[in-house]
Image: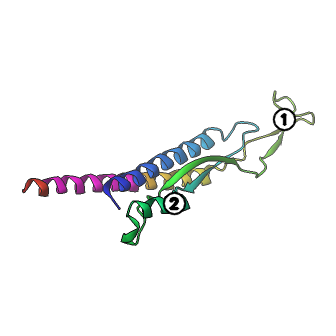
Amino acid sequence: MTLNSSLGIASEGLDAASSRLQVSANNVANIHTPYYKRKIPILLENNELSFQGVLTEMRNGVFHTGITNRPGGVLFAGMAEDPTPGKRVYEPGHPQADADGYVTYSNSNVLADMADATVSQRVYEANLAVVSMVKAMANRALEIGRGQ
């Protein structure tokens, strides 16, 4: 794995953790919003290895190393709505009440979203540490190249 692919994977991790944190913050911000549906972040593996990619690497002479040089990583693929029903409260005077006088409040769970935000923060910090280590490795390689 090259330094560039390590930075690419860490960069994808930073983007995914940041997006996941934004989803959690949005859920917490809308905890008292009627009819708001909690969003769940969808993360997918970034696996760019395809049959065509293997053939291309074989053609370019990379295959003889026994490994393919395709980076992994993670992608933020969007959000899905939590199907859990929200709490229905009888408030006939509320402007958003239905015909029966009920308002359905958000199904957001502040504890779950705060826990998810904490995990997202830790993932972000871990990927930032990877970027820092790769930077230190590149600087050390430059120093060795200069003969110091």
Q: From the viewer's perspective, is residue 17 above or below residue 36?
A: below
Quick check: is 112 in the magenta stretch?
no
Q: CA distance from mark 2 to mark 1?
A: 55 Å
Q: Secondary structure at mark 2?
A: loop
Callout 1, which amino acid? Glu
Report the residue at 13% width, 55% height from top: 145
As rendered, which of 20 and 143 lies closer to the eye? 143
Q: Earlier in the sequence, mark 2 or mark 1?
A: 2
Query: Label 1 belongs to which residue?
Result: 91
Residue 49: image tag = 2
Can you say which quadrant of the picture contains the N terminus?
bottom left
Give the class, few, some or many, for how many residues have Cα within 10 Å of label 1's Cα (few <14, many ≥20). some
The residue nearer to you, when weighing 38 against 54, is 54
Residue 136 within the magenta-colored segment of the rendering: yes
Q: Nearer the viewer, residue 46 or 95?
A: 46
For the C terminus, which image quadrant? bottom left
